Structures are given as structure tokens and as C-alpha cells.
Image (spheres, coloured by chain):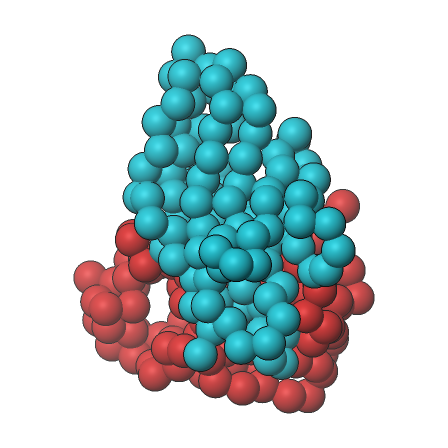
Amino acid sequence: NAGVTQTPKFQVLKTGQSMTLQCAQDMNHNSMYWYRQDPGMGLRLIYYSASEGTTDKGEVPNGYNVSRLNKREFSLRLESAAPSQTSVYFCASSEGQLMNTEAFFGQGTRLTVV
Amino acid sequence: AQSVAQPEDQVNVAEGNPLTVKCTYSVSGNPYLFWYVQYPNRGLQFLLKYITGDNLVKGSYGFEAEFNKSQTSFHLKKPSALVSDSALYFCAVRHNAGKSTFGDGTTLTVKP
């Protein structure tokens, strides 16, 4: 019953360092998403992948890249971390692009950039 | 553009009392509305959704939500609050290509 698994759970980076956040889902979902959560700002979509082999920008894509490695895995990369990227990052998946399907979320990665 | 507003940052209720967490929306076309709950240091969990049909939707943990098209609202309700209901609640609207827009969240505190 793993659902959506994110690694790592916590990370501290220095400004300019790079890292990749990993996400995997075992529900055979087609669509996957990366969000960031900042206090008082809800969740903002960074990138999403409607299906294997496709990725598209969301609301706040600058400073990030993604890879949909296969149907299960969707990674988020910070090439040169900035303090403004300090946030909690959530990966999510859903059955597809249908409007009536809910999303399933991972437990989050708390990232601090110093 | 699709948008969701949660007008209250914080809602406080006493255990056993009814609770309401408010949400209003703006969409073009038919609304697909969702409520999620987030417990501390956890991801969001789905509570319930409105797609079509009955305006009163029932979901997990005894929660329900009332869809009101004329007031463009989708308020979350529970007849009798529990201390364990204390959490952060998000309203969301689903739109094109499966993307969702989330409200800023409402912190619910239920006091014993």
C-alpha cells in the first residue's frame, strides 16, 4: 500500500548546489505532478506529466526541470538552488486527465536552501 | 481562469459542535470541486468531490460538502467536530489537462 513515495524527506542545500527529488507511484496512474507548498500560498503547480513521455510547465516552473522516467517515476531537478526555492515539495499522481479523478499525494520533501 | 478562494485562514470550534470550512470558486464551464485534508508533516489526503448530481456530497471521516451553484460555493461541513479533525484543509478545482488549482488552505482547530 505504498501509494506515492518521495525521497528524500528532508534536504539542506547550499545556494548554487543541484539536487534531484525522486517520486514513484505504484497505482498505475497516467498523470503525475510536482507542487510546492509555501505558507499562506496553498499549493502551486511546478510541472506535470499528463502521461508517460510528456511533461508540461505549471504555474511556477522557473528554476526546475523534470523527467518522466517511466510510468511510475517522475523526478524534479533543481540545477542551481536558490533560497527562494526553500519550500515543501509534493509529488502527486492521478488516474488520468479526467476531470473527476482525485489526486494522491506523497508525504513531501522539506527543502531548505541556505 | 479557474480560481478558488478560502476566505478564512483559521476556523476554531469546540469539540462536539458543527463545523464549516468555506470555499468559493470561479470556473468557466462545469465545476469539478474537491476537498483535501493535510495533517502535520503529511501529504494531502482526498476527502470528497463534487462532479455532478446531488448538491450534498458525503466523504471520508464523516465530512460532507454542500455545492451551491448560485453562490458558487462548496463549503465543507461536519455535524459534530472531533479534536482529531484539527488539520489544514484545502479546496481545489480541477480543470484542463487534469491540473488543479488549490485554495490557500484553512487551518481548523477543534478544542476539547
- A13 to A53, vertically: above or below: above
Which residue is drawn at the image coordinates 58% and 86% (left, top)? A55
Q: Position of residue B63 (x, y in %)?
A: 62, 34
Furthest-front residue in this view: B70
- A30 to A91, vertically: above or below: below
* Total tally of numbered discs in the picture: 0
Which residue is drawn at the image coordinates 55% and 20% (left, top)? B80
Q: Position of residue B40 (x, y in %)?
A: 44, 37
- The residue closer to the viewer here, A26 or B101, is B101
Furthest-top residue in this view: B112
- The residue closer to the viewer here, A100 or A23, is A100
- The residue closer to the viewer here, A103 or A84, is A103
- B60 to A49, vertically: above or below: above
Q: Which chain is cyan?
A: B
Q: Position of residue A52 (x, y in %)?
A: 71, 82
Quadrant of residue A79 within the rendered picture = bottom left
Q: Examine the rendering and report whether any part of residue A30 can be seen.
A: yes
Q: Examine the rendering and report whether any part of residue A64 can be seen.
A: no
Quadrant of residue A61 within the rendered picture = bottom left
- B54 to B100, vertically: above or below: above
Which residue is drawn at the image coordinates 70% and 81% (left, top)? A51
Q: Which chain is red?
A: A
For the C terminus of chain A, give its image quadrant: bottom left
Which residue is drawn at the image coordinates 41% and 71% (left, top)? A19
- Report whether A4 appears left or right of B99: right
Q: Position of residue B49 (x, y in %)?
A: 65, 52
Furthest-right residue in this view: A28
Quadrant of residue A67 within the rendered picture = bottom right
